Image: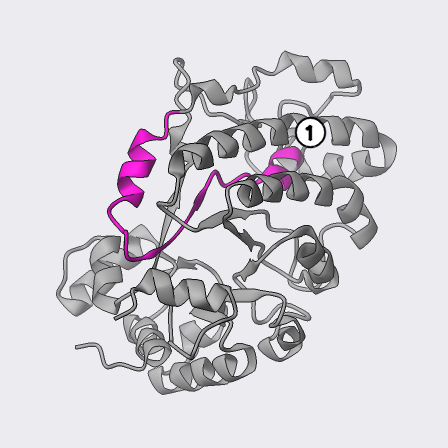
Amino acid sequence: MKTSREKVMEIFEHKSSGDGCMWTGHPSDETVKIYAAEWGIAPTREAIFDYLNDDCRWVMADGGYRHPSGRAAIDAAYHTTRESLSAGGFFAEAEEVSELDTYPWPDAADCDFTEIYEEIDRYPDKMVFTGVWSPFFHNVADFFGMENYFINLHENPKLVEALTERIVDYYVAANDKFFAGLGDRADVMFFGNDLGTQLDLFLSPEHFRRFVLPSLKRLIAVGKKYHKKIMMHSCGSIYRIIPDLIEAGVDILHPIQAQAKGMSAQELAQYKNDLAFVGGIDAQGLFVNGSPAEIKEEVKRVRELLGPSIVISPSHEEILPNVPAANIKAMAEEAKHQVIC
């Protein structure tokens, strides 16, 4: 009998014979309490995953950074205060590349991934998504302040490129160290940057190709070096750059924000021979307002369009308390063709 890890890998390699697989995502702390009470299980995410017979686990490696001072690896609010995405971060007033030297850049030598490996070792039969999350697009925007970032793309592009490179230098080094020690414990490098809004990209495709894509390629190269499948997360409407992502080496796209422009299963079906997918079941409206029967019909529809190259999952990994437990259960049952008691 095939393990979840084996079945999901067949999906990612476009060799699946039709085994249904699913990922619950990441129920919030409050959601965990609600679901546990309704299903009569322990109030933990792992209990929920076991109850639903989830095929996947997400183990982030970011916690491996252990600076002696206790500070975070990348902290845009270093020596400042930020209360919104628009608020300026540490480099809000920077104009010269030399000013970037004033931040205490992290060193991958301060990473110890022992506990991360131990957690991954608990799930030998599951498909584990892992790696240092590497949200460099957000980090750059936070260091400048979002509006400042967009202005600097035009007025000071060299500074944007230099800051992006400094940040990604750490993520590349940390991921390299992590995957070098990981061995064959897990098969998928998972990282994310939310590049889209509900209607379009944050950046033009041209700006994406200049300021973001080179760094994505650097990260992808690390995963490929260690023979991992590359799973990239991006919320929003990113349909205009999907061919760029495929060319760069992305193997799996997550989470397929179903209501975002150009991101419906029908529109993405053209890529199912080049990409595998994780997600696709609308978490903005359907999971909140639909019935279990409607959820099951949507799972069938999405799987018909994108299968067999899809792991069924919500279109956003964070499961909020307004999603009824019965709807998540319905997704799991239909995805795996079973009844959960």
Q: Position of residue 57 (x, y in %)?
A: 34, 54
SS of the residue under disc 1:
helix
Circle 1 residues within 10 Å: few <14, some 14–19, many ≥20:
some
For the image shown, how many numbered marks are present on the structure? 1
Tag 1: amino acid: Glu
Is residue 152 a member of the stretch shown in magenta? no
Disc 1: which residue? 165
Q: Position of residue 113 (x, y in %)?
A: 36, 30
Which residue is at the front of the view, 14 or 219? 14
**Quarter-wise, where is residue 271 in the image?**
bottom right
Q: Position of residue 151 (x, y in %)?
A: 80, 37
Quarter of the image with the N terminus is bottom left
Quarter of the image with the C terminus is bottom left
Residue depicted at 64% across the width and 12% down the height? 102
Which color scheme does this rendered protein use? Answer: one colour
Residue depicted at 69% across the width and 61% down the height? 242
Segment colored magenta: 112-140
- In the visual, does 21 lie left or right of 264? left
Is residue 139 a member of the stretch shown in magenta? yes
- In the visual, does 20 lie left or right of 115? right
Q: Is residue 72 above or below residue 317?
A: above
Residue 283 showing in the rendered view: no
- In the visual, does 166 lie left or right of 294? right
Which residue is at the front of the view, 139 or 174? 174
Q: Is residue 58 above or below residue 76?
A: below
Q: Is residue 24 above or below residue 189?
A: below
Q: Position of residue 162 (x, y in %)?
A: 74, 26
Residue depicted at 29% across the width and 75% down the height? 326
Which residue is at the front of the view, 216 or 137? 216
Residue depicted at 56% across the width and 82% down the height? 305
Residue 56 showing in the rendered view: yes
